[in-house]
Amino acid sequence: MLVNYNAYLSEDDINADEERFFGRVRYQGTKVSLSLAEVFRRESSPTDAVFTTRVSRFLSNTTPIIIVKASEVFAIEFQSDLQLVNYLRQAYQTADNFNSRSILTLAYTTNVNSIDLLLQGGYWAVTYQDSFAPPDANGFIGRLGARGEITPHPSRDRPCGNQQREVG
């Protein structure tokens, strides 16, 4: 288990202060790996094009990961990124939203430098909590890719693919 907390305060402008919390719980087995990470942030963000107006907001990012090794060369991975955004001023609460992105990965490990070939599929959504907010958006994800140590030193992750979007 890993836990970290940071608080940053600006004495000149109280709207520019922020707090962050990071926590992770992980289990690493021979066939199954589980991870749950959480980042809580209270931060101040610009709301206009010239960065003069700042609004405090609360963000929660939750990332669960499940990896199952089906054999020596084949694995099934599930990862989801869940984000809750709540503005702390009444005038901006119409922009409060919940974002999600979930991906299922089929990974095949090759004999060449243990590079994994990836087939990924998933779904993403942005859901606003207020009826006066912008329209919700969602779509599907489909990608092919490779990851691993392509050369002896740098490690690369090269996904490519298509995303479909729907608004409304």
Image: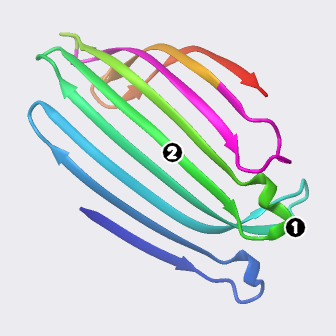
Element at label 1? loop
Q: Nearer the viewer, residue 44 or 126?
A: 126
Q: Residue at x 77, y 83 (%)?
A: 13
Magenta residues, start to end:
113-138
Which image quadrant: the C terminus? Answer: top right
Q: Which residue is drawn at 66% across and 78% down?
A: 17
Q: In this view, does 63 lie to the left or right of 24?
A: right
Residue 151 percent coordinates (x, y) = 32, 22
- Label drawn at residue 149: none
Residue where numbered disc 1 is placed: 53
Q: What residue type is labelled 1?
A: Thr
Residue 30 percent coordinates (x, y) = 8, 34
Which of the two marks, 2 or 1, is nearer to us in this view? 2
- Total count of labels: 2
Q: Nearer the viewer, residue 144 or 127?
A: 127
Residue ranking furthest to the bottom: 11
Determine if the magenta segment contains residue 120: yes
Identify the image quadrant of residue 86: bottom right
Number of residues whose C-alpha sits closer than 10 Å to that of mark 1, classed few (under 14), some (14–19) or many (20 or more): few
- Label drawn at residue 82: 2
Q: What is the distance, in whole Å, between disc 2 and disc 1 at their CAs?
A: 27 Å
Residue 97's place in the image compared with 78, above or below, is below
Colour scheme employed for the rendering of this structure: rainbow
Residue 151's place in the image compared with 81, above or below, is above
Residue 83 percent coordinates (x, y) = 56, 49
Residue ranking furthest to the front: 131
